[in-house]
Image (cartoon, coloured by chain):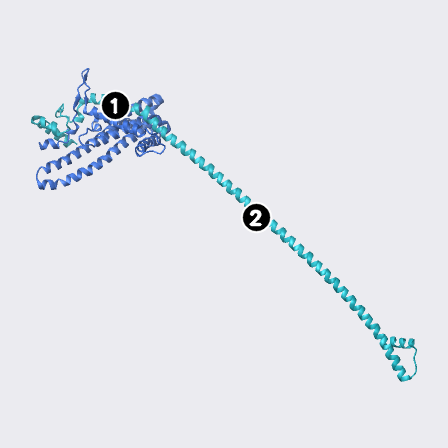
Chain colours: A cyan, B blue
Amino acid sequence: MFVTSAFAQESAPTVEGGHTGTEGDTHSGTGVPAETHGVFPPFDPATFPSQLLWLAITFGLFYLFLKKVVMPRVGGIIDVRNDRITQDLDHAARLKGEADAAVAAYEQELAEAKTKANAIGQQANDAAKAEAEAARKKVEAALDQKLGEAEARISTIKANAMKEVGTIAEDTASAIVEALVGGKASKAEIAAAVKSVAR
Amino acid sequence: MAADKVDPIHQFHINKLIPIEIGGYDLSFTNSALFMVATVAVASAFLYLSTSSRSLVPSRLQSVSEMAYEFVGNMLRDAAGTQGMKFFPLVFSLFMFVLVANLLGLFPYFFTVTSHIIVTFGLAALVIGTVVVYGFMKHGLGFLKLFVPHGVPVYLLPLVVLIEVISFVSRPVSLSVRLFANMLAGHITLKVFSGFVVSLSALGTLGIAGSVLPLAMAVALTALELLVAFLQAYVFAVLTCMYLNDALHPGH
């Protein structure tokens, strides 16, 4: 910086010396020669008042414009967006709550239906069992009755048979006595004798 | 002739466009003033037009404006807290002004407003003036606590207070010189390397071949200057925020 400023001080007079016309063409194009020579332009106090004045004017207007117009607008845009995002998030949360409630209700209904189905199944099972039991009992009772009847018949048949056995024995005994003894034994005696033997 | 072309200082000359003189002061409308107007016009037009649709989903340009707004807003909130937001318009306009002035200066043949120390000093003085005026308005003499850090032994106090005062007084200087010197040095370097290209090309075929090197350098430097333009605007705004924080909370 210091080297170049020294260079500027050296070269400035020669620039001004003979090439004023060309200088305007080759440089910034404003064509107005530099006001002061030999002074490094940024440190030239002659330019200070004008620069400060115009800085104050331009920056002051810029400040006012930003403060009054731009910043409320940008701030407003950002606030509106934040509000909108919060609102949308709330909405989403509410919808999610609703969905969760619906799922819970569905699951409860499902559980209720399951218990109901189980109860119905149980009931049907019980009814079927009871019916089967009743049917079995009826069949058993019928079988018992039939068995009793059969036993009774068997015992009558047996008793009849036994009675006939006695008569046959008496007949046989009287015939034997007739044949052996040749007389006739009284019926009562034979019956008594057979009875005593049978005992 | 060659010396003319590579004079790296010429770009900083102030030329009167409309001579005005009031009370012995030269208040002419110069090329510097013209580019101040251009800076303000470009920045205002960009911010105004890019946000004119007020879209909920921003366009590219609108999101650039919003990013700048939120960037500066967050910077100020981080440095000075929510109380500092009353200075948001000041910091935002400083940031935008410096940024656009720096960026405009990158165009060839354009004047760089921020390469003049009086401009950067004017902006820095505005910042420090705001700090001092607001500090005294809000805290009265309590603002002077700024110069008396807590927990310093009494026998060291005179020395520390002296150092604090010097550091406070050097703030506008460092704030203005940093921006000014960065822009000045960058533009001089650019001009020097571009000048090499021109001078070497004038030497014939070999010169043209050789001028590739400074040309590449000039291209690289342009990229660097673009970075510096952003960086210096950012640094200026950040330091402004920190100084404003001192006005709000003078106790260390």
In the figure, A156 relative to A105: above or below?
below
Task: Where is residue B193? Give x, y as percent.
Answer: 15, 36
Q: What element carries label 1?
A: helix
The image position of residue B12, as x and y in percent, is 17, 28
Q: Earlier in the sequence, mark 1 or mark 2?
A: 1
Work out whether residue B193 or residue B140 is closer to the camera in this orientation and state it. Answer: B193
Query: Which numbered disc, 1 or 2, marks the residue closer to the eye?
Result: 2
In the rendered structure, which amino acid carries the disc numbered 2? Lys
Please tell me how crowded label 2 is: few (under 14), some (14-19), or many (20+) other residues with Cα within 10 Å: few
Question: Within the image, what quadrant is residue B230 found in?
Answer: top left
Residue at position x 52%, y 42% in the image: A104
Residue at the image position 77 percent from the left and 66 percent from the top? A151
> In the drawing, does residue B9 fall left or right of residue A73?
left
Q: Is residue A100 visible?
A: yes
Res. A114 mark:
2
Q: Is residue A171 left or right of residue A78?
A: right
| Residue B171 % position (x, y) | 27, 28
Q: Which residue is drawn at 28% across and 24% down?
A: A62
